[in-house]
């Protein structure tokens, strides 16, 4: 069956076409290094037979760190610590990529007096914070930081890196006309707004070399007024492919509309925990609105993939609502995507790919309740919280 055929990404052969999409783990030490929990999490996924595992986003510079227990990629200290995790994944026949990010205007404000960096001064409506417009020096330094982080991933034994250019974080912020109001060479039209991503890609490629797979995850649509749409994202994706990107995973949404990225229920009581009344009212109404206009359906970015795929000369990875063998098989058979990627279902059932291969399950048991998303956003450890409420499973 198509799902269990081998697939090559930039010279890397994967045992099947099932990808574990990146999910923030909140499992690192306070210094950002992988722990035993991190190792156990990835060991389970590898035993469960995901062909490619993509880690949660690791920050390339402290100014781009979003959570206290997020993994780091900005220091050589990570190299030796990740090696045993990576080796264990390889022993089970899976491959693993490190996702690298700068959080930009979506970092939590106030931590260690951290200044929020962004292409322009556009407020964050989740944290009610205002970032600072990056200087040209900061832009060029951050591009170098991405390159250095990718080099560390390679040294640590990872099989690939994935550049996080989705969900409103720094690179996605540059791509979006909503958050990039610059009129210099880094903004003003779609091509200049995509320049930051292009330069990050070039820096990464020149550090890791041509024989190391470089992937990107990119918003195809922000689903926000004045945000990025396919008119800007498709040309940016094709430009990256021409420059030598090895595979593209498409997604959508920003921190302000998380249900665009991870469609399903709105765990309002989790997301509102610890917030003041005006913020709670604001979030509850926004989330209800999003649920109505961006409802869950299987393979929910499928139509965008079908439109992009004909002109994309590299493997396309479809994420978002992949829940059944039949649905995933149909995506691959129709040529809409080359690989399918799952996040929430594999948090709940890391062994799902194996079950699908053996024919002992047809559907994921994940109901997209989004409690995992709510708890992680509150700083909790990544896990499925559906059956346990807010208690750690
Ligand atoms: C708890 C949680 C953490 C996430 N963390 C990341 C992340 O670190 N990087 C990323 O690109 N996407 C992240 N995502 C988005 C997922 O990778 C995926 O794009 C989205 O959940 C839709 O896929 P699904 O329907 O299979 O869950 C996260 C989603 C969840 C639920």
Image (cartoon, rainbow, N blue to C red):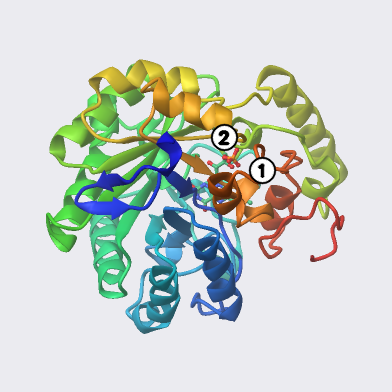
Image coords of residue 240 (percent x, y) = 22, 36
Tell me the quarter of the image containing the C terminus.
Answer: bottom right
Image coords of residue 181 (percent x, y) = 38, 30
Q: Quadrant of residue 40?
A: bottom right
User: Could you tell whether 8 is left or right of 69 in the image?
Assistant: left
Tell me the quarter of the image containing the N terminus.
Answer: top left
- Is the distance from the Cβ of mark 1 to the nearest ligand 1 atom less than 8 Å? no
36 shown above or below 213: below
Residue density around tag 2, few if under 14, some if 14–19, many if 20 or more, within 10 Å: some
Q: Could you tell me which secondary element the residue under label 1 belongs to? A: loop
Q: Quadrant of residue 101?
A: bottom left
Q: Between 152 and 359, which is closer to the camera in this rendering?
A: 359
**Residue 189 visible, this orientation:** no
- The residue positioned 76% from the left and 41% from the top of the image is 369
Q: Between 163 and 353, which is closer to the camera in this rendering?
A: 353
- The residue positioned 39% from the left and 64% from the top of the image is 93
User: Could you tell whether 307 is left or right of 380 in the image?
Assistant: left
Q: Between 185 and 362, which is closer to the camera in this rendering?
A: 362
**Disc 1 designates what residue?**
361
Q: Between 284 and 77, which is closer to the camera in this rendering?
A: 77
Image coords of residue 76 (percent x, y) = 32, 79
Mark 2 and mark 1: Cα distance apart in space: 8 Å
**Disc 2 designates what residue?**
325
- The residue positioned 33% from the left and 32% from the top of the image is 182
Specify the label residue 255 is tagged with. Answer: none
Q: Earlier in the sequence, mark 2 or mark 1?
A: 2
Residue density around tag 1, few if under 14, some if 14–19, many if 20 or more, within 10 Å: some
293 shown above or below 57: above
Label 2 close to label 1 by CB (< 8 Å): yes
């Amino acid at each position: 069956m198509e799902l269990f055929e081998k697939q090559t990404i930039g010279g890397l052969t994967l045992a099947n076409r099932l990808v574990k999409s990146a999910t923030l783990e909140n499992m690192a030490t306070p210094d950002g290094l992988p722990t035993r929990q991190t190792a156990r999490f990835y060991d389970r996924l590898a035993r469960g037979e995901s062909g490619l595992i993509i880690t949660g986003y690791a920050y390339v510079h402290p100014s781009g760190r979003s959570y206290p227990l997020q993994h780091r990629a900005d220091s050589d200290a990570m190299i030796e610590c990740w090696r045993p995790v990576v080796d264990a994944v390889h022993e089970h026949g899976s491959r693993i990529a490190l996702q690298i990010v700068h959080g930009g205007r979506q970092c939590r404000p106030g931590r260690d007096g951290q200044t929020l960096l962004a292409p322009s001064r556009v407020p964050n409506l989740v944290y009610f914070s205002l970032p600072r417009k990056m200087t040209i020096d900061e832009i060029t330094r951050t591009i170098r930081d991405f390159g250095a982080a990718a080099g560390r991933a390679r040294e640590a034994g990872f099989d690939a890196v994935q550049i996080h250019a989705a969900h409103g974080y720094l690179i996605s912020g540059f791509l979006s006309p909503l958050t990039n109001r610059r009129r210099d060479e880094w903004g003003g039209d779609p091509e200049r707004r995509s320049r930051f991503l292009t330069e990050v890609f070039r820096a990464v490629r020149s550090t890791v070399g041509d024989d190391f797979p470089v992937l990107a995850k990119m918003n195809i649509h922000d689903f926000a007024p004045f945000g990025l749409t396919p008119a800007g994202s498709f040309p940016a994706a094709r430009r990256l492919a021409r420059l030598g990107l090895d595979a593209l995973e498409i997604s959508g949404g920003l921190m302000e509309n998380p249900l665009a990225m991870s469609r399903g229920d709105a765990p309002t009581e989790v997301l509102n925990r610890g917030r003041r009344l005006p913020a709670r009212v604001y979030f509850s109404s926004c989330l209800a609105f999003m649920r109505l206009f961006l409802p869950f359906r299987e393979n929910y970015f499928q139509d965008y993939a079908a439109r992009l795929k004909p002109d994309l000369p590299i493997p396309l990875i479809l994420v978002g609502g992949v829940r059944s063998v039949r649905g995933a098989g149909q995506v691959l058979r129709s040529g809409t995507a080359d690989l399918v990627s799952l996040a929430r279902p594999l948090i709940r059932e890391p062994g799902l790919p194996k079950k699908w291969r053996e024919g002992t399950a047809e559907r994921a048991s994940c109901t997209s309740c989004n409690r995992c998303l709510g708890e992680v956003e509150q700083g909790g450890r990544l896990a499925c919280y559906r059956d346990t409420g807010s208690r750690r499973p």
